[in-house]
């Protein structure tokens, strides 16, 4: 499917939208289902939102799939999340021409070999794609990313470090998110894209991530189109 973004009826479509996908557990609890069922439905939202983003002409999306803090959850839930991530990566590998070019943001250390293998396969299978870029934040922490960037710069012998040096040393050198969407009513950043979010617009919704699909994305984009981004200048 070709990208028909240029015909989007929406004004002012953000180039990069990042998602803090929250509320899977509450979605499941409300239906008396195990938390894993919420994560499974949440994975379906990932696919639906990626397809919608592509259709709407968004160029980059980042999904916060697993934080460095999520290791604190019970082992069984971590295992279920990792297994679902593996399934999602396999799907991206199989549908390589249809969906997107994948990128990875996170620390490989600490991730299981099996997941890394699936990740590398998906990255390789989609590398030639020109369409939508889907950046997957897995085992990701914003502070860790900044610390890793400084480690790289120190190893390169950099003494005087500029903002541009730091930006270029992050996990991915892609445009910063124009819009960060967090579902489930929580209003915090939870260690996500701390450097890149300096001038992002934020959109919070009570909708739980498994219920977040194309109509909810459209609603967020309509709201974004009304915002005035001033970057410190005067309004008008
Ligand atoms: C988001 O849903 C999934 C991850 C953080 C990996 P949660 O599992 O955090 O759902 P709630 O917040 O408990 O409802
Ligand atoms: C944020 O959700 C992390 C991801 C979406 C991967 P959490 O549910 O882990 O966030 P907190 O702990 O409530 O801040
Ligand atoms: Mg949560």
Image: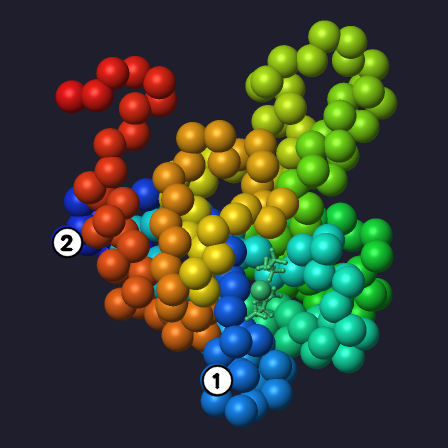
* Quadrant containing the N terminus in the rendered view: bottom left
The Cα–Cα distance between marks 1 and 2, rounded to whole angstroms, is 35 Å
Q: Is residue 5 above or below residue 179?
A: below
Taking depth in this image into account, of 91 and 63 the one nearest to the observer is 63
Residue named by callout 1: 30
Verify CB contact (< 8 Å) between mark 1 and mark 2: no
Residue at x 54%, y 83% (from the top left corner): 29
Q: Position of residue 85 (x, y in %)?
A: 64, 70
- Relative height, residue 34 to residue 234 (above, below): below
Residue occupied by mark 2: 9
Q: Does 133 sit left or right of 64 as displayed?
A: left
Image quadrant of residue 150?
top right
Across and down, in percent, residue 11 comes to 17, 44
Q: Kindly identify the residue that appears in the image at 84 percent across and 23 percent down.
A: 155
Residue 114 visible to the viewer: yes
The reply, left or right, for residue 66 in relation to residue 108 is left
**Callout 1 secondary element:** helix
Which of the 4 image quadrants contains residue 215? Answer: bottom left
Dot 1 alpha-carbon crowd within 10 angstroms: few under 14, some 14 to 19, many 20 or more: few
Residue drawn at point x = 77 percent, y = 13 percent: 158
In the image, taking residue 26 as reference, residue 217 lies left or right, namely left
Counting residues from the N terminus, which is met first, the one under dot 1 or under dot 2? 2
State whether residue 51 is above or below residue 3.
below
Q: Nearer the viewer, mark 1 or mark 2?
A: 1
Left or right placement of residue 143 versus residue 225 in this view: right
Q: Position of residue 179 (x, y in %)?
A: 39, 44
Q: Which structural element holds mark 2? A: loop
């Amino acid at each position: 499917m070709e990208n028909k973004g240029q015909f989007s009826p929406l004004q002012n479509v953000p180039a990069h939208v990042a998602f803090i996908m929250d509320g899977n557990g509450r979605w499941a609890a409300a239906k008396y289902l195990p938390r894993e069922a919420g994560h499974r439905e949440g994975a379906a939202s990932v696919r639906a939102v990626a397809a919608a983003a592509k259709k709407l002409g968004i160029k980059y999306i980042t999904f916060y799939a697993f934080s460095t803090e999520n290791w604190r959850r019970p082992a069984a839930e971590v295992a279920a999340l990792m297994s679902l991530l593996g399934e999602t990566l396999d799907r991206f590998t199989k549908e390589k021409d249809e969906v997107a070019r994948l990128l990875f943001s996170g620390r490989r250390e600490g991730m299981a070999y099996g997941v890394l293998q699936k990740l590398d396969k998906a990255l390789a299978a989609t590398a030639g794609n020109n369409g939508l870029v889907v950046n997957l934040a897995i085992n990701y922490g914003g502070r860790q990313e900044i610390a890793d960037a400084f480690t790289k710069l120190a190893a390169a012998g950099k003494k005087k470090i500029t903002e541009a040096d730091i930006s270029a040393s992050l996990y991915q050198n892609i445009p910063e998110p124009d819009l960060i969407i967090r579902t489930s009513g929580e209003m915090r950043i939870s260690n996500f894209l701390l450097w890149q979010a300096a001038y992002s617009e934020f959109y919070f919704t009570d909708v739980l991530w498994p219920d977040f699909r194309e109509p909810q994305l459209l609603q967020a984009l309509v709201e974004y189109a009304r915002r005035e981004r001033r970057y410190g200048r005067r309004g008008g």
